[in-house]
Amino acid sequence: MLLQLEKFLKQLLSLPTATPDPAVFILSGILPVEAQIDKRALGLFNNICNQDESSTEKQLARKSLDSNSWFIEIKKILTKYNMDEINNYLDTPMKKEKWIPLINRTIQKHWSDSITRIVPYYKGLQHLNYMEFYQEKLHPLLKIKCQSARDVGRITPKLKMLTGTYILQSHRIKMYENETDPVCLICHHWDETIEHFILECEGLSDIRNPITDEINAILKGSTNVDFHQQTSKVKMQILLDISMLRENLKLDTKLIAKIEYCRIRLLFLLHTTRYSFLSKGWKKDKKNVKV
Ligand SMILES: [Zn+2]
């Protein structure tokens, strides 16, 4: 069931199945199924705690703590979230109005901590902003207003680039035995890494430069930040997930939306230009094959 939710979320976001699971939870703002089940179970447990001592369920709760019962599972869940002993809740039940927010907060924190803790271990996720995952909200990148189906389609390549699942030559060499060359097929000079593709490849500079100039003008006008003077790391952050720099650069929502519009366009144009370039190359190769 756990796997199915992750698979479903990946399909919903049009991401490949190889996308790291933490990325899917962070983007969707949805916790794993295990967390949802724990919330329900603890909700039901609190209802039982609030019943009269003479109720069958409550008596069962007190008696069956040594046997293999549902209450043993509750005991395990309480331990997982560092909560009190089961008997404490049975003896002094909490009001539902207090219990529900406490459970939501505790479970959210536990899962946010454990999911975000492993993000740094995924190289492909280094630019993904996970700070807002703690609020169980949709990732800021997916909150952008889309005017048309075309805008929605433009988000997919960007999400792939952000989650390290956009396939470039440097990835192909790791995935396919027959691929031996990580060199960029557009400029034929450097390895085609994500930084090379987005920031450096000279074969794409006609597409890239006017839009990065536009981003530079927006940033300079409002924050005095010169995009062109930034390190590759910061440039990549601006182009892949600027919400991470919201505090540092003191960016407001309006400014983020303006830059978002430019960078979605940039990444999509880089994607389509690369694709059409490679398709032409492949067609040419096919013509050259002598039968
Ligand atoms: Zn290149």
Image (tube, helix red, strand yellow):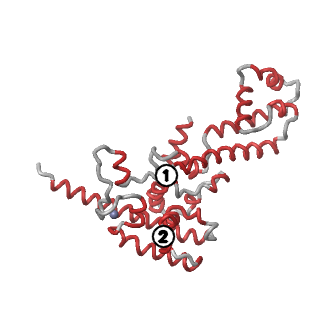
Is residue 56 shown left or right of residue 278? right
Q: Is residue 2 above or below residue 282?
A: above
Q: Disc 2 designates what residue? A: 262
Q: From this viewpoint, which residue is outermost toward the bottom? A: 221
Q: Disc 1 designates what residue? A: 123
Could you tell me which secondary element the residue under label 2 belongs to?
helix
Residue 61: x %, y % from top left: 79, 25
Residue 214: x %, y % from top left: 47, 76
Dot 2 alpha-carbon crowd within 10 angstroms: few under 14, some 14 to 19, many 20 or more: some
Q: Is residue 106 above or below residue 153?
A: above
Camera-nearest residue between 175 and 265: 175
Q: Residue at x 73, y 47 (%)?
A: 105
Camera-nearest residue between 192 and 272: 192
Q: Residue at x 39, y 67 (%)?
A: 200
Camera-nearest residue between 105 and 192: 192
Residue 114: x %, y % from top left: 63, 44
At label 2, which amino acid type do we have? Cys
Q: Nearer the viewer, mark 1 or mark 2?
A: 1
Q: Residue at x 25, y 60 (%)?
A: 280
Q: From this viewpoint, which residue is outermost toward the left? A: 291
Check mark 1 vs ligand 1: CB closer than 8 Å? yes or no. no
Q: Residue at x 48, y 52 (%)?
A: 124
Camera-nearest residue between 24 and 52: 24
Give the mark, 1 or 2, whose residue is nearer the N terminus.
Answer: 1
At label 1, which amino acid type do we have? Lys
Is residue 48 shown left or right of residue 249? right
Instruction: Ligand 1: give its quadrant.
Output: bottom left
Check mark 2 vs ligand 1: CB closer than 8 Å? yes or no. no
Residue 122: x %, y % from top left: 51, 49
Kindly report the distance in space between the C-alpha atoms of the residues bearing marks 1 and 2: 25 Å
Could you tell me which secondary element the residue under label 1 belongs to?
helix
